[in-house]
Image (cartoon, rainbow, N blue to C red):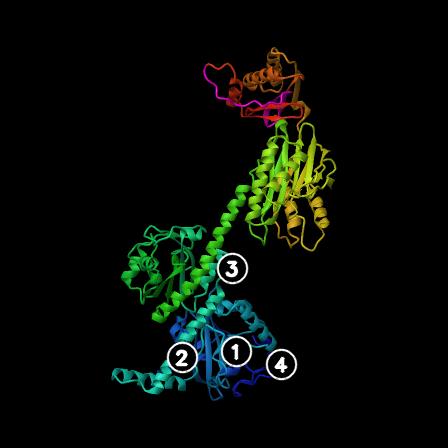
């Protein structure tokens, strides 16, 4: 432990007091480790200096023989300044095995070859699979001069470079051994220790440590005498002498100040995040072990779910979720009996019900066997009585805005003083602060859930396969600007086996952008269903944005894929270009499209281009949040997009994940990301059959015949009967309304059987209500009844009426 202490020359055993510390304000420590058999397993050089026993004589001996302080705390002994915490047993009882929590004290002892020494000691129980049971730190109190007012509390620490097994792990666990010490504070102390090369004491007027040794017999005796005088005065009904009144006031002031310091410290440790789970843990851990030994936190079911709940007082049907249990008992003792995550109501006779209905703390000085039995009755097949009987209990409500969100059950070990009225006030204030923090986290979680629900409702649920193509999508919310944004993607089914792909990005973030995105996406779906050409669709969308308001600005990329013609028809409104990955050689390229102005600018023409594709090519469309990083040229992101898109992948989902990993790990991304990838499989010529029909009513019979023959060739004879009937109805109507051009009939075999009938009449047929005596209007009624889907749309030369039938399972 003192490996670095060669910089000083340690005195020989019995040579007097320990050497002066290397720096003012720090005092060397004796470090002793006691195993589970009560034998010394480590004896530091500081221990040799303090107790006058060499290491080779100490290791393996009984600790009580080497640390003769158990009898030094005579009847004059009283617990240290933190006696209210119940941390004042003598070291001898600690070594006997009765210690289950940190303890500290002061003793006078006689070491061989030296005068009686005034020793401060600390003892920390060690829990774990190793043989070590107790860590004892001790220091010579001479020279500390506690009466000069320079410090009030002292914090022990020890060096990382030690020489007993497991000490490095102990040093890393300083915040656990000294529970009120933060990770940052422990790192600072360890850093100072490394400079000195041996364990030290630190003095502070402000830092709070879990246990502080008593300062001496003389002061204890004096305080004891004062208390006895005060007790005699009260018993005789006499007023307190002035000196005792001043001391009482000083003690009261010190107690109040300590409570305020504790509350201030707790306030600084909770509410560091708006994450509800993290806040729950912070609240529970803030009070253990300084204020209580066990803290169980219960919250309303709706609070845990991040939902709203009806106002009013809870009742016996209200479910309370146990969300955290912190304790100083041995690991696992509470886990099986009161597991985190369990939900339960509480009967009216329990102190928990009284607390949550009154909104006031409930104090139980000691849990009697009767009360322990009543509480344990709620836990089926689990006996909680050994955990709670005899302990002091304080139940405090977690309130915010006069609403009870939950409560905390605080329990102290029977060895510690019971909770008192001051603890009740402290607990109420603690719960009030914790309640506000929890309510803020709850409301944030609720708003996040609302935002996420809104975003999910606006994003489409696209099937992984559409006519002639496979599709995969990804959406990532902005990492710093909330979960709601204006990015969107979509895939719209068009007649003729075609599919429209769209990716857009509303400028800005938040609910306004999301609402605007929803309006534009709906408009695109509607206009795509009307089969508007890409450039005309963007023109109409731009007009709509200007009518909605001058704040509507968005970029949009619109592409129509024709799997039969193996062609993409694309138009761009200020969006980043798509990437096309060629199936033949795996080469990827950014498609060169006319950029166009963003939607909402107005007065700018849009142009469309046609691009030939081959079966297996992949189209990648995304928003700029994926490729744009602050401080970096967007060309770098586009190049990375092309490279990652060309990477071979086992599936479409894997290909999307590869792109996300390549671009999302560069750091600095703050914007939303929408990604759509389509593998353009095409439809083989053998799966398409077309005919031209004359404008003659007799052609309906010919249409039935060619459809029947084609379906037999395709091994779809079971669909012949309904297909013939529906084709006959559509061809009859087309022949009747056609003007000059022949009627076109087309069958397409894909995921479904698609049938289309074209004519040169621009009037779209509509589904009508048909009476029993009507001669017309029944054709579309038959189509609507028998077809899987059907629809109509205008074309450049007239209209198309189509239907689909489900293919039989093979």
Element at badge 3?
loop
Reading the image, the residue beneath label 4 is 7
Query: Does label 4 or label 3 sit earlier along the sequence?
Result: 4
**Of the residues tagged 4 and 3, which is closer to the observer?**
3
Q: Secondary structure at mark 4?
A: helix
In the image, 568 versus 283, the foreground residue is: 568
Q: Quadrant of residue 654?
A: top right
In the picture, measured across the screen, residue 340 lies left or right of residue 683, that is left
- Residue at 64%, 13% in the rendered image: 695
Q: What residue is pinned by disc 2?
A: 70
Asked if residue 175 is positioned above or below residue 247 in the image, the reply reads: above
To which residue does mark 3 refer? Answer: 273
Distance, label 1 to label 4, CA atoms, is 18 Å
Residue 229 colored in magenta in the image: no
Nearer the observer: mark 3 or 1; the answer is: 3
Q: Earlier in the sequence, mark 1 or mark 4?
A: 4
Q: Which residue is mark 1?
A: 201
Is residue 389 something one can see in this rendering? yes
Name the secondary structure under disc 1. strand
Q: Position of residue 149 (x, y in %)?
A: 48, 84
Q: Earlier in the sequence, mark 1 or mark 2?
A: 2
Q: Of the residues tagged 1 and 2, which is closer to the observer?
A: 1
Of badges 2 and 4, nearer the viewer stands 4
Quadrant placement of the N terminus: bottom right
Q: CA distance from mark 2 to mark 4?
A: 34 Å
Give the answer, above or below, for where 406 lies relative to 654. Answer: below
Secondary element type, mark 2: loop
Chain-order first, disc 2 or disc 4:
4
Q: Quadrant of residue 727?
A: top right
Whole-angstrom CA distance, mark 4 to mark 3, is 45 Å
The Cα atoms of the two marked residues, 2 and 3, are separated by 46 Å
Q: In the rendered structure, find residue 684 and report the number of the disc placed on it.
A: none
């Amino acid at each position: 432990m003192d490996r670095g202490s060669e910089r000083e020359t340690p005195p020989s055993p019995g040579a007097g007091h320990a050497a002066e510390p290397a720096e003012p304000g720090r005092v060397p420590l004796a470090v002793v480790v006691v195993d589970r058999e009560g034998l010394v397993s480590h004896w530091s050089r500081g221990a040799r200096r303090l107790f006058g026993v060499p290491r080779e004589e100490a290791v393996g001996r009984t600790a009580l023989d080497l640390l003769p302080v158990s009898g030094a705390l005579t009847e004059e002994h009283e617990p240290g300044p933190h006696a209210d915490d119940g941390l004042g047993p003598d070291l001898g009882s600690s070594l006997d095995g009765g210690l289950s929590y940190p303890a500290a004290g002061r003793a006078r002892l006689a070491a061989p070859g030296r005068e009686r020494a005034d020793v401060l000691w600390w003892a920390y129980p060690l829990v774990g699979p190793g043989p070590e049971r107790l860590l004892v730190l001790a220091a010579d109190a001479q020279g500390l001069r506690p009466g000069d007012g320079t410090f009030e509390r002292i914090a022990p620490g020890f060096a990382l470079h030690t020489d007993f097994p497991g000490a490095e792990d102990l040093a890393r666990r300083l915040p656990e051994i000294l529970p009120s010490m933060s990770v940052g504070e422990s790192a600072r102390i360890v850093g100072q220790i490394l400079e000195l090369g041996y364990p030290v004491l630190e003095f502070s007027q402000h830092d709070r440590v879990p246990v502080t040794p008593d300062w001496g017999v003389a002061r204890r005796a004096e305080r004891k005498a004062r208390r006895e005088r005060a007790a005699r005065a009260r018993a005789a009904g006499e007023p307190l002498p002035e000196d005792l009144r001043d001391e009482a006031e000083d003690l009261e002031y010190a107690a109040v100040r300590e409570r305020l310091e504790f509350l201030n410290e707790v306030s600084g440790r909770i509410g560091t995040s708006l994450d509800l789970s993290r806040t729950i843990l912070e609240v529970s851990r803030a009070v253990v072990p300084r204020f209580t030994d066990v803290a169980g936190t219960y919250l309303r079911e709706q609070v845990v779910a991040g939902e709203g709940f009806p106002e009013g007082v809870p009742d016996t049907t209200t479910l309370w979720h146990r969300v955290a249990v912190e304790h100083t008992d041995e690991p696992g003792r509470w886990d099986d009996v009161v597991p985190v995550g369990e939900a339960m109501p509480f009967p009216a006779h329990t102190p928990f019900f009284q607390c949550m209905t009154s909104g006031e703390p409930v104090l139980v000085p000691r849990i009697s066997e009767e009360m322990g039995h009543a509480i344990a009755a709620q836990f089926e097949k689990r006996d909680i009585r050994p955990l709670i009987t005899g302990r002091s209990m304080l139940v405090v409500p977690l309130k915010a805005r006069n609403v009870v969100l939950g409560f905390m059950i605080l329990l102290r070990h029977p060895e510690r003083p019971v909770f008192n009225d001051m603890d009740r006030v402290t607990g109420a204030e603690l719960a009030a602060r914790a309640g506000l923090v929890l309510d803020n986290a709850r409301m944030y979680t609720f708003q996040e859930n609302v935002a996420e629900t809104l975003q999910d409702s606006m994003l489409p649920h696209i099937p992984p396969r559409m006519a002639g193509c496979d599709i995969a999508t990804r959406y990532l919310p902005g990492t710093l600007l909330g979960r709601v944004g204006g990015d969107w993607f979509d895939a719209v089914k068009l007649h003729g086996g075609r599919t429209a792909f769209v990716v857009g990005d509303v400028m800005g973030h938040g609910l306004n952008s999301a609402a605007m995105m929803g309006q534009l996406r709906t408009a695109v779906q509607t206009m795509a269903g009307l089969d508007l050409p890409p450039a005309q669709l963007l023109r109409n969308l731009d007009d709509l944005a200007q009518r909605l308001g001058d704040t509507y600005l968005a970029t949009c990329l619109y592409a129509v894929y024709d799997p039969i013609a193996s062609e993409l028809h694309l138009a761009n409104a200020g969006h980043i270009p798509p990437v096309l990955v060629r199936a033949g050689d795996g080469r990827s390229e950014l498609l060169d499209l006319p950029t166009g102005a963003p939607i909402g600018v107005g007065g700018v023409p849009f142009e469309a281009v046609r691009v030939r594709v081959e079966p297996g090519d992949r189209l990648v469309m995304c928003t700029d949040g994926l490729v744009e990083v602050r401080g970096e040229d967007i060309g770098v992101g586009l190049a990375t997009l092309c490279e990652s898109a060309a990477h071979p992948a086992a599936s479409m989902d894997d290909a999307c994940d590869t792109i996300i990993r390549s671009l999302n790990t560069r750091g600095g991304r703050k914007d939303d990301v929408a990604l759509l990838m389509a593998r353009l499989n095409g439809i083989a010529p053998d799966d398409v059959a077309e005919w031209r029909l004359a404008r003659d009513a007799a052609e309906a019979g010919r249409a039935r015949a060619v459809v029947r023959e084609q379906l037999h060739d395709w091994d779809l004879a079971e669909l012949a009967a309904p297909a013939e009937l529906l084709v006959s109805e559509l061809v009859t109507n087309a022949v009747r309304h056609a003007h000059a051009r022949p009627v076109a009939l087309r069958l397409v075999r894909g995921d479904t059987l698609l049938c289309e009938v074209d004519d040169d009449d621009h009037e779209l047929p509509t589904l009508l209500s048909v009476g029993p005596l009507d001669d017309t209007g029944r054709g579309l009624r038959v189509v609507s009844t028998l077809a899987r889907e059907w629809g109509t749309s205008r074309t450049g030369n007239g209209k198309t009426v189509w239907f689909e039938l489900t293919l039989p399972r093979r």
